[in-house]
Image: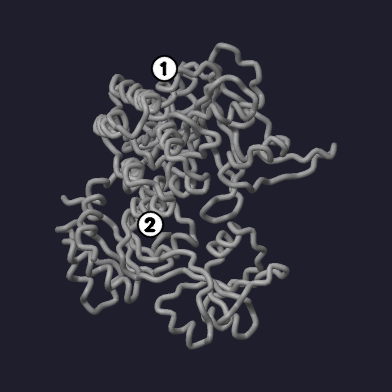
Amino acid sequence: MKVNKNIFSNKEKAMFALRSLYASHGFSMYRMSKFEEFELYASNMDFLDSGQIITFTDTDGMLMALKPDVTLSIVKNNRHIGNRIIKLFYNENIYRVSPKTHYFKEIMQVGLECLGAVDDECISEVLLLAAESMNVLSDDAKLDVSNLDILTQLFESCNISRETEEQLTMCISSKNAHGLERVCRSADLGPAKAELLKTLVTTYGNPDEVIQKLEAEFLENSLFSFEEKVSFGKSISALKKVVEAFKRAGLEDMLNIDFSVVSDLKYYNGIIFKGFAAGIPDGVLSGGQYDKLMKRMKRTSRAIGFGVYIDSMGKLSKFDGEEVEIVD
Amino acid sequence: MTEMINIALPKGRLGDKVYSMFEKAGYECPSIKEKNRKLIFENPEVGVRYFWVKPSDVAIYVERGAADIGVAGKDILMEAGSDVYELLDLNVGKCRMAVAGPAGFSYDRNNELRVATKFVNVAREFYAASGTDIDIIHLNGSIELAPILGLSDVIVDLVETGTTLRENNLEVVDVITEISARLISNKSSFKFKTKKIVEITRSLESIIE
């Protein structure tokens, strides 16, 4: 087959470069239908960024939806995973309401998911692929990583209402230390716990420095029981393993630990992350572990994945004039 | 070369006050005080580029990355639900977001409460939390007129001294939240210009009264 190498748009070049990257790491392409039964989303509405979905009634009377998300479909369609890890990537159009314009938008998303016996090695592989995806799209990219379990464990030890948790999460995600202090005061949290929560706002950036600070603040703190220290230790160690993997791959310069990366605590847990490219105002990659979603969907295995929003990357001028070369 | 930080300031009295804080913190830009029609002012020596925008637009400039940082009222941030970092409470432009109604007003829960406001989202969220059915009337100004003319039962608005309310026989029924000007940053800019943005934040923090 002959294809003129000049016909590819920058967006198509990016899309194919990412697909090649994932395929070269042993991920298989997952194709899905355009429509899903609305019921799938109705029972997991909070998982989606926006609760609005384009629906229609099919000829058999079934309420259908134009897919606003790919992850839910992948989980739904992979029932019997067993002891292995299923590695899939996708390249699909999804339909969501833009939080900025409040109108529906067709968004092209490329991403990957690992379902099954997800272990530390698999988590590191996914994070490195996220970092490499960012490097495909931009010459100057950063990957912010957090461990949601640290936040969840800290909330548990504070014994606070769900509403306070949400307010605190919002303050942490917007690096709002003054707001966080106010919420802590009105929730009657003691100064020691308030200070720890503030640590999550003020500590970010260089992974080694952040880990050192976390170990000092959480593991040598008389506020916590032995059991609590053990679980904080596990969460910090999960971050350390990611940092070590990045060092081995020579990608540590693009890694930050930043607790302002948060996701819905009902669905996500453990390592979560977000990718940023210089000059692009929004995050262009987002992902994390979603064992809690798996549990909600009656799956016994674990999962991690991410999505890349190529449309947010603008003109992708990095690819201007770059020729497409077909390789084996 | 010094890295340049784009700063969106709110036009008007609050903006003047905020600029003088930046100036005091070491980020002066003398050309900003010249009387001319220029829209952008920069001082490459200290690495800042200022521009004045409508106060309600600051958060949009910052969220969309046209400005790295900016100063916006908490009222605007709450209403727009802006996805930005809120780095500092500048402790200026202070007022309260409050519910106000005719003196002695009491709400009869059998009827839908009619609420006139500029801050539709804030009002909706506030009443949703208490499970109150409301009919929102979106107005752009002279909100205090609405309950006087019977257009609404109450209003949700900013209250500074309360003089306008008192002169119109209205009073604060509920305080939703305290409002002040906040230093905000674009999330992506913060990743790539961390050092400079943190330096500006700390300098401003040290001069807050």
Mark pair 1, 2: CA separation: 38 Å
Circle 2: residue type: Val
Q: What element carries label 2?
A: helix
Which residue does the image show at 21% across and 51% down from the upper left? B199
Extreme residue toward the right, this view? A60
Q: In this view, does A58 lie to the left or right of B151?
A: right
Residue A140 percent across, percent down from the top left: 31, 38
Residue that mark 2 sits on: B62
Q: Quadrant of residue A103?
A: bottom right
Residue that mark 1 sits on: A121
Front residue of this view, candidates A45 and A7: A45
Instruction: Please check whether the numbered discs 1 and 2 fall on a single chain.
Output: no
Q: Quadrant of residue A208?
A: top left
Image: A66 above or below B167: above
Q: Quadrant of residue B37?
A: bottom left
Say which quadrant the C terminus of chain B sits in.
Answer: bottom left
- Chain of the residue displaying label 1: A
Front residue of this view, candidates A294 and A106: A294
Extreme residue toward the top, this view? A83
Residue B98 - label:
none
Front residue of this view, candidates B111 and B34: B111
